Image (cartoon, grey):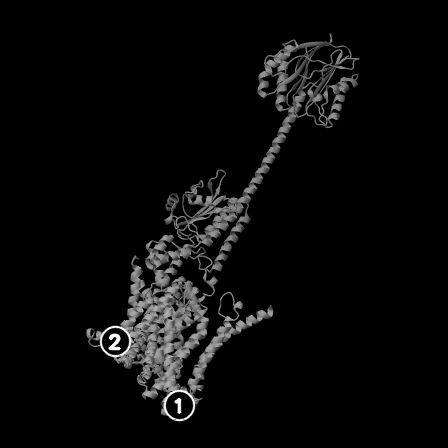
Amino acid sequence: MLSIELVWGVSLLYIALIFLVAYYADQRQKSGRSITANATVYSLSIAVYATSWTFYGSVGKAATTGPDFILTYLGPSLTAFSWWFLLRKIIRVTKENNITSLADFISSRYGKSQWIGALVTLIAVMGIMPYIGLQLKAVSGAFSIITGHPDFHIAFLDKILLPSPHPGLFTALFLGTFSVIFGARHLVSSERHDGLVAAIALESIVKLVAFISAGIFVTYFMFDGFVDIFSRMQLKDPRLTAHLTTFNEYGETSYANLFTMLYLSMGAIMLLPRQFQIMAIENSSEKHISMAMWLFPAYMFLINIFVVPIALGGILSSGSSANADYFVLTLPLQSGHPWLVLLTFLGGFSAATGMLMVESVTISTMLLNHVFMPIIVRLKPRSWFPILLINMKRFGVFVVVLLGYFYQSVVGETYMLVTMGRISFAAAAQFGPALIGGLYWHRGNRIGAITGMFLGFLIWFYTLLLPSFVKSGWWQSDIPAKGLFGLDFLKPTQLFGLTGLDIWSHSVFWSMLFNIGAYLALSIILGQDEREQEQAKRFVDVFEPEKIKMPWETKRLSKPVTILQFVNLMTKFIGETQSHAAISEYLGNREIDSKGGVSEFELPNLKRFIEKTLAGSLGAAAAGAIVESYLSDIGSKMESVYDIFSTVRTSLDQSREALYVRLRASEIMNRSLDLQIIMEDLLELLQKEFKFDLSIIRLVDEHGILTVRCYRSTGSQQITGHSWQPEIDTHIGEAFLGNRAEFVNDTQYLTKPKSKEIMELEGIRSFAHIPIASEGEPPMGILSVFSKSIVGLFTEPFLQLLGSLAGQLAQAVKIVSEREAKEMERLQKEAAQLENARVLRDMEIAKQIQLSLLPASFPDLPGVRFACRCVPAAHVGGDYYDFFLREENNIDMIIADVSGHSVGAALIMVETRSVLRAQVHSTTSCTDILTVLNDLLYEDLTRAELFITMFYANYNAESRILNYANAGHNPPILLRRGKSSCTELDAEGLILGVNRAVSFEGKSVQLQQGDLVLFYTDGITEAQSVTGELFGTGRLCTVLTEVFEDEPQKIIDRLLKEITEYTSSNLLQDDISMVVMKVN
Amino acid sequence: MWPKLKSVVLQSLRFKESWVIFFILGIIMMNYPFISIFDKPTFVFHLPLLYLYLQIGWLVSILVIYLFTKANHLPKNQEDKKGEPR
């Protein structure tokens, strides 16, 4: 026997050591240099599977029923083959979804159902109860064996506390406190607990070393090795030896039982909540799996290698298999090795505490997230919630441990350790179908999982747990003997008349049959809702992320929520630091708009991120519920985007539908060149396909105003009456000026007052304005669509579709307007040509009239002959010559030139002629006429900015005297017979139209027979050659000298010929007029 | 190029299958009727036959997994992109 004080002291020291290791690991984790993030520690931590059951119970089992104990460890070794596929997938899913526990995992998979989470938690708590009872019993049993006192016992407490000691109560309180301190320190559950893992790994080493030490002591010190033990056993009791080393046909070592145990343990290594916690949630890298795959089975092998020798050794030395559970302690104790006893006790203590630590962490997390949280989330979030939550978690730990204590005190004396543990295994097996099915089968649904697990749990309770209560005598009932309600076929151990099986196989058979059956049947018969489908994809296709991600968002928030609102929500549950860190990680380089929100299409993503972050502490189901209820508080909710094609389709089909609409649209564009028809058909198409209540096409007119060009509407409305000056205070203006689609999915939350008023008036729920613009060009109009019934109509792909339709329309508008511009240009050209032709014709007429105004010939007076000619440069000209017969032998001659060659010049010439004709008979002298003319024409000439040069002459045929006056005209040339030089007949006088009062010099000259006088305009002397040289008076004089003897008409012809040759072209720059006078 | 690709494909195929084969083999060897071959109260090398069978079988299975994981880590450069189990 060892003293109580020694055992207490060593136990406390050992606990202190564990705390120290855990503390050190935590510190290392905080500084980012984790000691537990390696494959060896991971493998050792999985060995938490080996509990007191392994440490004490295996020996007990080996000493009573034989080899079936080993199945509990062979099963996990076999399962290890599948880890590279199965465990890796579980870990991947766990990390990607911030899973916190097994219950969270299953509830997440089935649409984040709170009911499933609660059911899994219930099964886990009830199922784990015997397992924890087992640990308490083992520790208190071991304590009493080595000290001789019952329970984990403190002497002075006996006097003040309970008069009749409750066996195991102190142990329960002691271990419960230990678990609270250890397991429930933090709220966050999805993060790794480095301290916990380090402690578990250390304990795994301690229990292995302790057990092997005891094994070596028994095998090689008490006996002479394996062979010796078996030989002595065979010698002592061959029948018992055969019983303990072979399987049998019936009972607990039958093949049926073998089968059952193998599968239970194969499942248990994955399905026990604490195994899930250690293997999936505490895993730091998927790479660690491959080492764990062989190291963990090796650990199991090592810890079991001495089980049979110790069991047989115990029987040999004690003579029977009574109290065989504690052979590992009693053998060293009896042979007087107290330190070995203490080491072995610590090994068993490690095995129990390790299990309790992890179990309490995971069960309390499950309780908090799936039992307490659903109630808490219905309350209004408060600032003290984090404190409440952590304390509820601690409370949960105590509840779990006390439940174990309850079970142990009720059943403990009746069952062996292993038997109690197996009840837990059978409970854990109920998670199997939902978990494995959920990982590999898309169709597995919530109803199936919940029904299957519930039925399995019921049958487990009825066929295993209930009989254990009755057998212990705690509950007096004749149900096991006579069946429920006295119905024979409802006997718990012979359900539906099934006999011949041990209680495990019987219970597992029925519970799994109903579990799997209900899961499969209901999953096939009933469907999944959208959320379940999404979650199922996340789980089953976790290795194919491209399958999980939808090409576009199918959900929207009915009322936008700002980032700040979300952060405040998170703060209430997980504290300020954590929520701020999370949100800044999320935002990264995402765009935030001016109101501190993300775009409408980004919102569902943000919401999912908030849920995921909260899920890391509270579990997916509770996190989902919190966010949902928060959203509903502020009047928002997650809703499906409206399916514009009004049928449920996959993304591929949807894009096909969109393609169809585009195709139809381009048909419309190509069918007609009339823009009005195109616009009407397009709106018709939109109306038909998308059920808009109103759709409008506005195009910007030449004044920059958006004018309604076409619309379709199902009812009366006034919107089409508006033409908008595009301004930023309306959505349509914003769409036009910003050249981007503006949409409002719920007009309830409109911020622009002007728009809100209009939309309310018309009863419009959602609308969008899409700019009609070609790529890279400013918009030329707006396509507006309105719906009066559907909120949340406009999704990203839908807006893309509308945008592409608007783009097509822009092309059509562009083509039409280009075509119209071309047409206009052509018409203008034609009109101009027509006008030109008309003017030309008029000019021709004017020319004809003008020419007809000039005398074709001069009258022949006695002794003098005339010839005249006018060659106009333009169609009409300003040259003028004329004559007036005063008497029979007296004639007036005029030659004049109005400046310019325009119609104006021609008109002035006509006016001059009229005035002259009116005045010629009331005046007598040449100077008088010029003076009168100047006076009469001055105003008109000034107004027209024209002037006239004029030479006026009077010739008397009898006296042969030529009187003349000149108003700035080219002086006529006089060539006398016999003289070769020319004389210019010049007189002083200013051009007409320059000054009102002008005096003209009158001159006269006596002509003789044979004299030649040429009156001409400056068109002759200023005719230019190709080189720009003027014809000049000198050349004119020379020509005149040559043709002096000819007839006047010939002289004119010759002169014209000379000039034409000189200019070497038919086009004259100026009018040419001349009158030749020859005296006979 | 082709022989190399072929060997990679063959290797990975063989791998995935053999993994499953050994798993199933383990289950078969641990179940009736196979286990009844060794389920006899006889002694081999002075040790019970079933005890020997289970212990040796266990060791072999651990060794097999060990070899698998070694092989799994060997052709690291040929690991496919998806991270699918091979």
Indicate the amino acid at tag 2.
His
Q: Residues within 10 Å of mark 2 (few under 14, many from 20)?
A: many
Q: Nearer the viewer, residue A898 or B28?
A: B28
Image spot of residue A883 (x, y percent): 68, 14
Residue designated by label 1: A231
Q: Chain of mark 2?
A: A
Indicate the amino acid at tag 1.
Ser
Q: CA distance from mark 1 to mark 2?
A: 41 Å
Q: Nearer the viewer, residue A376 or A992?
A: A376
- Which image quarter is the N terminus of chain A in? bottom left
Image spot of residue A815 (x, y percent): 55, 44
Numbered circle sitting on residue A627:
none
Numbered circle sitting on residue A153:
2
Classify mark 2: helix, strand or loop: loop
Work out whether disc 1 and disc 2 sit on a shared chain: yes
- Any part of residue A870 in sight: no
- Any part of residue B15 in sight: yes
